[in-house]
Image (spheres, coloured by chain):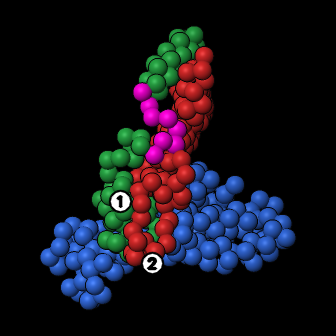
Amino acid sequence: MDAFMTEVVAKYNYWIYVILMMIGFYAMIGKRNLVKKLLGLNIFQTAIILLFISAGVKRGGGIPIVDKHAALEHGVHAAQTVNPLPHVLMLTAIVVSVSVTGVALAVLLRIWREYGTLEEDEILEKLSQ
Amino acid sequence: MKKLALLATIVTGALLIYGVQDFAPWGDPDAPASRHLSPHYIEKAVEETHVPNLVTAVLGDYRGYDTMFETVVIFCAGMAVVSVLRRPKS
Amino acid sequence: MMDQRTESCDIIIRMTVRIMMPFIQLFGLYVIVHGHYSPGGGFQGGVILGAAYIMLSIAFGLKDSTRYLSEKANAVMGSIGPMIFVGVAIVCALVGGLFLDYSALDKIIPLGPIEWRSMGIFLVEVGVGLAVMNIMLSLYWDLASNGEMEEGL
């Protein structure tokens, strides 16, 4: 029981991201409305971003902005600063997710213009006519 | 159909939670993610680029190629939206 | 000239936007140029600058807001952004360094190779900021007006 509790305390954040990812994944494959699918995609991306950010956390580490003169004189110790690499990767991932959302909304607007609906089965019905 | 989707979601979630066992604990300074490349960035970035914000240093210099094509990605997204939606006044 | 009913908002909102606008843009520029020393950089500052123009087009109506930044100018500025980035990278290669190795720019203006790596990041961030600002604005314009640029939200 004690070992299980240590495991929970050490890794509960990953479990939260898995649950968030499950919500997004279900919205992507289970819903019939295309806008809901897009919202699911965004929730999924949020889960991935949170996972990466929390992979870079170091207990007791400060923000990845250091004092220039102190760093040039004494150097920086790697344990004092959180890992900047996931932050960089996720900064670009956020911008890509905005681009994906924009393009997806544009395509949805075009589908709306063409078919007058965003429900998947109604679009399929109109396509098969 | 919805039951199938729910089943697939739960199976994926269970597999991921099973995989989480091998992750390093949260905030562990010796996690594999913080041991390989990032100590070099943290310790050498200020010396090599004179930029105190390590995120900017890695974004603009060490991983400039990544950022460059990322700018191209947003540019392509903007062009795609304009070419899909824009229409002249009727 | 201005269709009061559909196009523009209340006078209080318009006045507030008019006053806020330069401060928001100044803050966006600050975030871009101060990205070396504080949280910030091209992406964040570009989004703030884009949000300022989006606010303008919500408050004044989409058609009137294009008087301040026309569609053509927006497209040109959005293309200049990536060109600055790629241009800096190519100039680095042309003067004898590697692609995107900013320290090679020392041969054009002698500032010292390490200072040039810092300056090169700044140039690149300006390009990223321009691109992000104009692409965000054109995403909003086309999505809000359904591609017609007649009236926004």
Start-end of magenta stretch: B22-29
**Circle 2 is placed at which residue position?**
A69
The rendered magenta stretch, by its main secondary structure, is classed as loop
- The residue under the point 74% across, 71% down is C17
Residue A53's spot in the image, x, y percent? 50, 46
- The residue under the point 62% across, 74% down is C27
- Looking at the rendered structure, the secondary structure element under dot 1 is helix
Distance from label 1 to label 2 (Cα)? 17 Å
Decide which of B71, C138 is in the foreground and name it: B71
**Circle 1 is placed at which residue position?**
B41
Colour of chain B as rendered? green
- The residue under the point 46% across, 24% down is B21
The chain containing the residue under callout 2 comes to A
* Chain identifier, colour red: A
Residue A108's spot in the image, x, y percent? 54, 39
* Chain identifier, colour blue: C
Which class describes the residues within 10 Å of circle 1: few (<14), some (14-19), or many (20+)?
Answer: many
